[in-house]
Image (spheres, rainbow, N blue to C red):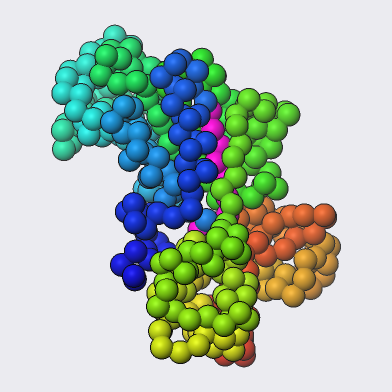
Amino acid sequence: MMDVIPWGLNAELTDDQFFNRERDMLFLTKLLDSTKDGIPPALLLTGIRGVGKTALLNKLKNNLKKDYLIVYLDLSSSNNYQEDKLSRMAFMQLFYKRIIESCKEYGLKTIDKQIESWFKTHNISLKNIFNIDGVPVPIVGFEEDYTKLADFVMNLPRNIYEKYSDEMDGILIFIDEFQLIKDLDDETNGFLWYLRSFIQTEKNVSYTFTGSMSMEDSLLGEINGAKGAFGGRMLTYQIEPFSYETTKRYLIERAGHLEFSDDGFERFYKCTRGIPFYINTFVRFLMPGEILDNEKVSLEFANVLPFLAINLINDWKNLSKQEQKIITTLLDEPLRRVDIARNLDVTSGAIGASLNNLLNKGLIMYEESRYAVSDRILSAWLKNEYDRRGVYPYRDF
């Protein structure tokens, strides 16, 4: 049965590997399918890291790709984001590239000439148009041309649908890791309003944004709050972790070779919190042939922590020393800003930038006037490192 248990990092799941999301799939499919009737929904899918948002998107994409042109872009795949240079221009360049790639995958054979024609008629200053792997890529002559290029790219899905409406029911655009637009800093709010100006007028083009955000994330207010860019007009749908009973059913059906005692399963659920990434990764390391009781599961959990926390460890390594110390200060209990500063022996104002960066990365959360570490796996890994080495891993290791 292990072949139907995906590794935690797998986002492309087979039908046998996909589990439990029938209700989510039915609801979201019905919403998205209204695009063909000219009433496309604007969706915001939220959920904590590892809960399976990308796997769900890929499942939706595969189910709907025969009837819709589907454009999928992952902001984390942008070279500019990886180099801490995410900008409006970088977003539009990535968006454009994914649109053209999707057209080719869908089989729109004349898209190259159509794109070049649209460029010429929209009076965009270009240095050249290079054909890379069959994709016509515009090289913009001057940075001042961003406005024209952005307007062109945002109008492109509508233009494509109008040209090829007899070949598709509509266009579905999925933008993953959308929380990364926080890297735009002061431009974030203005960019959201800019996106809205196009999205709210679409008839057969639907936008779905996903991001690793809790319902308390401040970005949700900027996007869809009463004073946010979309002002409550975007449907927010949260993808939840597996419940206790769903996790038990999943293990019985997909990992029946493992034998848990009652307290062992309770410990397993507390360790993974029903998050598919953690469930799948942990299960892969558990050996059959022995009773998995509370003590055994706790021991194996400590051993597998570096694998469960692999993405979080990478985030940890890229933090400043002050940001790391803020997190270790919060391991035992949530604290007010003034108390964090006191523990670090600095002024409250001196930690403002670090707190904002940690909030933007989703590593801490702010609730009831206190800050707390947002992921228990990160807390568990840091505590385990301290118990093992007698020091937190502030330096590279």
Where is residue 90 shown, x and y percent of the image?
41, 37
At horizontal 47% and vertical 74% (from top left) the residue drawn is: 282
Residue nearest the observer in this picture, 98 or 67: 67
Q: Main secondary structure of the magenta part?
A: strand
**369 on left or right of 301:** right
**331 on left or right of 128:** right
Task: Please indicate, yes or no, whether residue 156 appears anywhere in the rendered image.
Answer: no
Where is residue 206 shown, x and y percent of the image?
45, 26
At horizontal 63% and vertical 81% (from top left) the residue drawn is: 263
**92 on left or right of 139:** right
User: Is residue 43 a member of the stretch shown in magenta?
Assistant: yes
User: Is residue 247 a member of the stretch shown in magenta?
Assistant: no
Task: Please indicate, yes or no, whether residue 288 appears anywhere in the rendered image.
Answer: yes
| Quadrant occupied by the N terminus | bottom left
Q: Quadrant of residue 184?
A: top right
Where is residue 232 shown, x and y percent of the image?
67, 28
Q: Examine the rendered structure and indicate whether residue 362 appears above or below residue 129.
A: below
Q: Quadrant of residue 140?
A: top left
Residue lying at the far top of the rendered structure: 121
Residue nearest the observer in this picture, 107 or 284: 284
User: Which stretch did the figure color magenta?
Assistant: 42-50
Where is residue 223 shown, x and y percent of the image?
62, 34
**263 on left or right of 368:** left
Q: Quadrant of residue 364?
A: bottom right
Query: What is the tally of numbered marks visible in this picture?
Result: 0
At horizontal 47% and vertical 22% (from top left) the residue drawn is: 34
At horizontal 16% and vertical 23% (from top left) the residue drawn is: 109
